[in-house]
Amino acid sequence: QVQLVESGGGSVQAGGSLRLSCAASGYTYGTGCMGWFRQSPGKEREGVAAITTGGGTTYYADSVKGRFTISQDNAKNTLYLQMNSLKPEDTAMYYCAAGLAFACYSGSSTDFRYWGRGTQVTVSS
């Protein structure tokens, strides 16, 4: 059974940084896709970043390019999201997700089969 557990969320001031982690168990890294999504109250869930687990190709939402970096440690089965220059509009629940490789190309949340429970990120101005 695949389990994804996020950690690292918290409250920071605008301009600050946070590093999210997602520990994956029961997931065969191989050639798949792992990503980060976020959702604020009253808004739809949106893709933030994704990475192909085999080749390490990364994808980012325009809103976070240049500020967020997704990475993985296959030996530790852990996914990371380094978030710098945080803005109040980055405030959301952040979710880790995993799926087959094509999920990275589509970017659609419906193509990710496994989800964590989320970690809250709050950025104050």
Image (spheres, grey):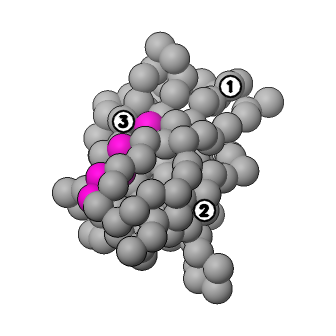
Instruction: Depth check: give the residue in front, 50 or 67.
Output: 67
Q: How crowded is mark 2: few (under 14 residues within 10 Å), some or many (20 or more)?
A: some
Residue 29 placement (x, y as % from top left) = 52, 26
Number of marks drawn: 3
Q: Is residue 30 above or below residue 80?
A: above
Q: In this view, does 76 lie to the left or right of 2?
A: left
Q: Give the amino acid type for the residue marked by disc 3 in the picture.
A: Ser
In this view, the residue in front, 65 or 67, is: 67
Residue stretch rendered in magenta on the structure: 80-85
Which residue is label 1 attached to?
25
Residue at 59% x, 82% y: name it. Answer: 43
- Image quadrant for the C terminus? bottom left
Disc 2 to disc 1, C-alpha distance: 21 Å
User: Residue placed farthest to the bottom in the image?
Assistant: 42
- Tell which of 90 and 79 is nearer to you: 90
Q: Residue at x 60, y 40 (%)?
A: 7
**Mark 2 = which residue?**
93
Residue lying farthest to the left in this orientation: 66
* Most frequent secondary structure within the magenta stretch: strand
Between circles 2 and 1, the one closer to the viewer is: 2
- Left or right of 54 on screen, residue 11: right
Specify which label sits upstream in the sequence, 3 or 1.
1
Determine if residue 111 is in view: no
Mark seen at residue 71: 3
